[in-house]
Amino acid sequence: MLELTRRMTPSRTSFTRIAGCYVDREGEFDGSFNTNFLKLTPQEKTKNLKLAKAIPFSETNVQLKKYAFSPSDQGAGSVWQLLMAIKDCGLKNDALMDTFYDLVMEQYKGNAEYAVFVFHDRYDVPVKAADKERLGESEEVFEYLICALCPLTGEYEPGNPVCGFLFPAFTDRSADSDHIAVYQADPLHPHREWEERILGLHI
């Protein structure tokens, strides 16, 4: 995870796009956005990178746990298929994004306004020699999504994420589309609907 998070600064980021929606206190849709990440102002980049970084930078195996999508979870109409399609289009298909937002709004149990943020990134994974020194050329491109669900602390101002995910999982420095890394800010009081009803996992 450190390999990913150390690049999440305004000067080093390779994030391509950010999309999201706002949800009111009654759980109703309150607007959405979808924009090229590089077109954000420096201040907006910093603020949004902080939200994205909170997911992979969290405590592994406590706040951030890896779960498997079984073969039966990867069929037509599955959440896995939806996430793969969102990743492959780089967030540029608004119909797919709306389908994901609808799923969250139908299942997430919250009692306050919140926002859903989705980030898309392509990371050129460098080849490393036996002595761990970077060789320079790219071994593969790790294309992935980070999602963060954040309560709003003011008018369209997100607080710290309460749950989220990184998909595909980053396993042995490579994309692992059979797994997803799920974030829960409070592992003692997790939002189980995030894992089971929204992501379709069998916990």
Image: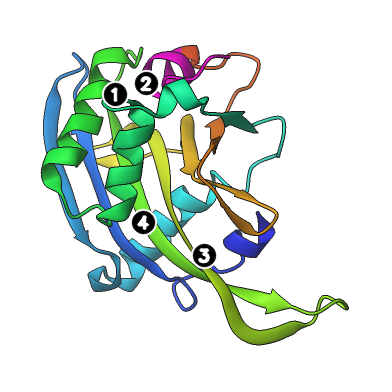
Mark 3 or mark 4, whichever is nearer to me: 4
CA distance separating discs 3 and 4: 12 Å
Q: Residue at x 25, y 22 (%)?
A: 103
Secondary structure beneath dot 3 equals loop
Q: Amino acid at mark 1?
A: Val
- Circle 4 packing at 10 Å, graded few (<14), some (14-19), many (20+), is many
- Identify residue for label 1: 104
Up-down relation of residue 160 to residue 144 (above or below) = above
- Residue 170, percent from left and from top: 60, 51
- Identify residue for label 3: 8
Q: Amino acid at mark 4?
A: His
Secondary structure beneath dot 1 equals helix
CA distance separating discs 1 and 2: 6 Å
Q: Amino acid at mark 3?
A: Met
Verify CB contact (< 8 Å) between mark 4 and mark 2.
no
CA distance separating discs 3 and 1: 26 Å
**Furthest residue to the bottom?**
136
Q: Is residue 180 left or right of residue 147?
A: right
- Identify residue for label 2: 198
Q: Residue at x 42, y 71 (%)?
A: 14
- Residue 5, percent from left and from top: 59, 60
Secondary structure beneath dot 4 equals strand
CA distance separating discs 4 and 2: 19 Å
